[in-house]
Image (cartoon, rainbow, N blue to C red):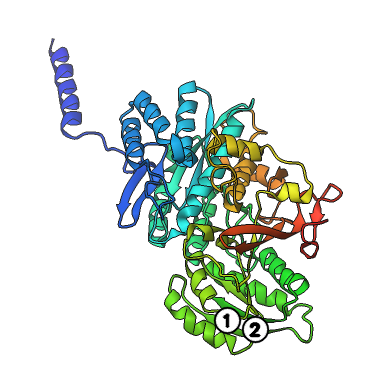
C-alpha cells in the first residue's frame, strides 16, 4: 500500500509539474501571416488572408469586402462559406481576379484528399507605386498553369502559396525572413518562384535562399555580371544582355538611328544592368558615324528632374533616347521631347505596364518602342502553332466573353506568359517523380536536366538562365501595343523557329 501511495504521489507531482510548468513550445513563427503596412498588407497566404484589395485608376477590382469575408471564413475553417464568397467575388467584371481563383483551386485540392506539392509564389500586390499591377499579371499566369496541371493525370496536384512583398525592400526582407524560418513546417513545399523585380538587396535575399538549397525560378532576368549566384537559382526570362542586344540591333538595323542618348537610374539594379549591357553592345561593331552622345542619371519616381535632364541631353542632338526607367516617369519624358518628331524613344519590358497609367499616353510626334518577353498575337504573326494557353487564358478570365480583345481578360501580356512558364517549368521538372515526397535537391537537379517548350520560347537552363530566348520589340502608341519584330528562337530544333529582329517578324 505504501508503494502504491508513493507512486500516486509521484504521478501527482509529475502531472502538477506539467500543469504548472508546461512543456516548452516551438518558437518558430507560422508560415502564413498578414502584416499591415501604410501601403497595404504584406504576407503569405493560402486563402487565409488577401492582398489584392485596392481599386486603381478606376481599373481595379471592386470585390474587397467579399474577399475579406471569404478569407475570414477560410481562416475560421468555414470552408463552404468561403467557397460561396469567393464565387461571388469573381462574378461580373472581377472575373480577372487570379488571387481568388488560386485560393479556390487550393481549397479544391485540399477537399479532394489528393496528394499535392506546394510552390511559393512571390509577387508584388500592394505598394505606393503602381507597377505592382505586374503582381496581378503574375498571379494570372500562375493560375492558368496550376489549373492546367491539376486537370491532367499527374501523380499529385499543385497548391500555391501567394506571397506579397509590396514594393519596399524592407517588406521583402520581412517576408523572406518568415519563409526561411518557417518553410520546413510544411514538407509539401518544393520551391519558390516569382520575384518580379531585382535590386541589389533582393539579389542578396535570393542568394541567401539559394544557400538554403531552395530551388528558385524567377520571372525577372539574371545579369551575367552578377557573380553572386548559385545553382539553385534559375531565371525563365531572357537575360539582361539579350534584351539590351535586341534593343541595339533594332535601333541600328531597323530604325537606322546613330546618335543615342541614355537616361537611367544608377541606384536601381534593373536600370543599371540594362544600361551597362546596352553600352557594351552598342560599342560592339559600332559604325564610325554612330555614337553615345550623352548619358543622364535620374532617380526612378522622381520625374520632376526629368525635364531639365531631357533639355540637357537634347543639346547633344540625339536621334533616339534609350530610357531605362519606369512607366510612371514615361509621360514626363514624352512631354519633354521636341514636336519635330526627330527623336524616338526605346525602353524596356516594364513599359508594358504603361496602359495602366492614364497620363502615359504618347503624343503623335513621339515614337516609343520597348523590348518585351512575349506578345499575345506572336504565334499568328510568326505562323507558329497556337498553344493551349491562349484559350485557357480566356476560359479562366473571361468565360462569358464580356471583354472581347481586352488585356487582362482575353489578351495576356509578357508578365502573364513569363509567370506561366516559370510555374510550368517547375511542374515539368516535378512530373518525373512518382509521388510528392521528393526532396528539394532532386527538383533542382531535375530543373537542370529538363527541357520545356514554353510559350515564351524553349526553356533549357544553362547556368541558371535560358539560352536563345526570344525578345520581342513592341511599339507603344496611343495606349496600344503593336508588334514590330522578334529576335531569338521559339523552337531551335524546328525549321523556321528562329527569328531576326531586322525582318519584322519574318524568319
Q: Which residue is mark 2?
A: 318
Spot occupied by residue 129 in the image (x, y as percentages of width and height):
42, 61
Spot occupied by residue 305 in the image (x, y as percentages of width and height):
45, 80
Compared to residue 174, the image places residue 78 above or below, namely above
Name the residue: 54% across, 87% down.
312
Residue 372 versus residue 179: which sits nearer the camera?
372
Which residue ends up furthest to the right in the rendered image?
A: 495
Left or right of 127, for residue 205: right
Compared to residue 87, the image places residue 246 above or below, namely below
Compared to residue 397, the image places residue 3 above or below, namely above
Q: CA distance from mark 1 to mark 2?
A: 11 Å
User: Between disc 1 and disc 2, whose residue precedes?
Assistant: 2
- Quarter of the image for residue 82 reads top left
Name the residue: 68% across, 56% down.
463
Left or right of 299, for residue 12: left
Q: Which residue is mark 1?
A: 338
Amino acid at each position: 500500500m505504501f508503494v502504491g501511495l508513493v507512486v500516486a504521489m509521484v504521478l501527482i507531482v509529475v502531472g502538477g509539474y506539467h500543469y504548472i510548468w508546461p512543456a516548452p513550445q516551438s518558437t518558430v513563427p507560422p508560415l502564413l501571416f498578414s502584416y499591415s503596412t501604410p501601403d497595404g498588407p504584406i504576407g503569405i497566404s493560402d486563402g487565409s488572408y488577401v492582398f489584392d484589395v485596392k481599386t486603381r485608376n478606376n481599373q481595379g477590382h471592386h470585390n474587397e469586402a467579399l474577399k475579406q469575408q471569404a478569407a475570414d471564413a477560410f481562416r475560421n475553417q468555414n470552408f463552404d462559406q468561403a467557397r460561396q464568397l469567393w464565387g461571388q467575388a469573381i462574378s461580373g467584371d472581377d472575373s480577372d481576379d487570379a488571387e481568388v481563383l488560386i485560393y479556390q483551386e487550393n481549397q479544391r485540392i485540399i477537399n479532394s484528399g489528393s496528394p499535392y506539392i506546394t510552390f511559393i509564389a512571390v509577387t508584388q500586390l500592394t505598394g505606393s507605386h503602381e507597377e505592382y499591377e505586374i503582381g496581378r499579371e503574375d498571379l494570372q499566369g500562375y493560375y492558368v498553369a496550376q489549373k492546367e496541371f491539376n486537370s491532367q493525370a499527374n501523380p499529385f496536384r499543385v497548391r500555391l502559396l501567394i506571397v506579397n512583398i509590396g514594393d519596399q525592400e524592407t517588406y521583402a526582407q520581412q517576408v523572406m525572413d518568415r519563409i526561411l524560418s518557417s518553410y520546413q513546417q510544411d514538407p509539401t513545399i518544393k520551391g519558390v518562384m516569382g520575384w518580379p523585380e531585382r535590386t541589389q538587396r533582393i539579389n542578396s535575399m535570393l542568394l541567401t535562399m539559394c544557400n538554403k538549397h531552395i530551388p528558385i525560378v524567377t520571372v525577372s532576368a539574371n545579369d551575367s555580371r552578377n557573380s553572386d549566384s548559385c545553382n539553385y537559382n534559375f531565371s525563365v526570362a531572357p537575360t539582361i544582355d539579350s534584351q539590351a542586344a535586341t534593343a541595339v540591333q533594332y535601333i541600328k538595323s531597323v530604325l537606322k538611328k546613330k546618335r543615342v542618348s541614355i537616361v537611367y537610374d544608377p541606384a536601381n539594379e534593373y536600370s543599371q544592368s540594362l544600361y551597362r549591357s546596352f553600352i557594351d553592345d552598342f560599342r560592339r561593331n559600332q559604325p564610325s558615324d554612330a555614337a553615345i552622345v550623352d548619358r543622364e542619371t535620374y532617380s526612378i519616381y522622381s520625374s520632376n528632374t526629368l525635364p531639365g535632364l531631357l533639355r540637357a541631353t537634347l543639346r547633344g542632338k540625339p536621334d533616339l533616347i534609350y530610357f531605362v526607367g519606369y512607366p510612371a516617369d514615361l509621360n514626363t519624358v514624352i512631354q519633354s521631347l521636341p514636336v519635330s518628331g526627330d527623336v524616338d524613344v526605346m525602353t524596356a519590358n516594364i513599359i508594358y505596364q504603361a496602359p495602366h497609367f492614364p497620363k502615359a499616353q504618347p503624343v503623335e510626334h513621339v515614337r516609343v518602342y520597348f523590348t518585351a518577353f512575349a506578345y499575345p498575337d506572336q504565334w499568328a504573326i510568326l505562323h507558329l502553332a497556337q498553344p493551349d494557353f491562349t484559350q485557357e487564358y480566356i476560359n479562366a478570365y473571361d468565360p462569358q466573353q464580356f471583354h472581347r480583345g481586352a488585356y487582362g481578360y482575353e489578351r495576356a501580356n509578357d508578365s502573364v506568359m513569363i509567370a506561366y512558364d516559370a510555374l510550368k517549368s517547375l511542374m515539368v521538372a516535378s512530373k518525373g517523380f512518382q509521388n510528392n515526397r521528393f526532396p528539394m535537391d532532386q527538383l533542382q537537379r531535375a530543373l537542370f536536366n529538363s527541357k520545356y517548350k514554353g510559350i515564351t520560347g524553349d526553356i533549357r537552363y544553362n547556368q541558371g538562365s535560358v539560352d536563345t530566348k526570344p525578345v520581342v520589340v513592341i511599339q507603344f502608341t496611343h495606349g496600344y501595343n503593336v508588334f514590330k519584330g522578334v529576335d531569338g528562337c521559339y523552337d531551335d530544333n524546328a525549321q523556321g523557329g528562329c527569328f531576326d529582329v531586322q525582318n519584322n517578324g519574318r524568319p
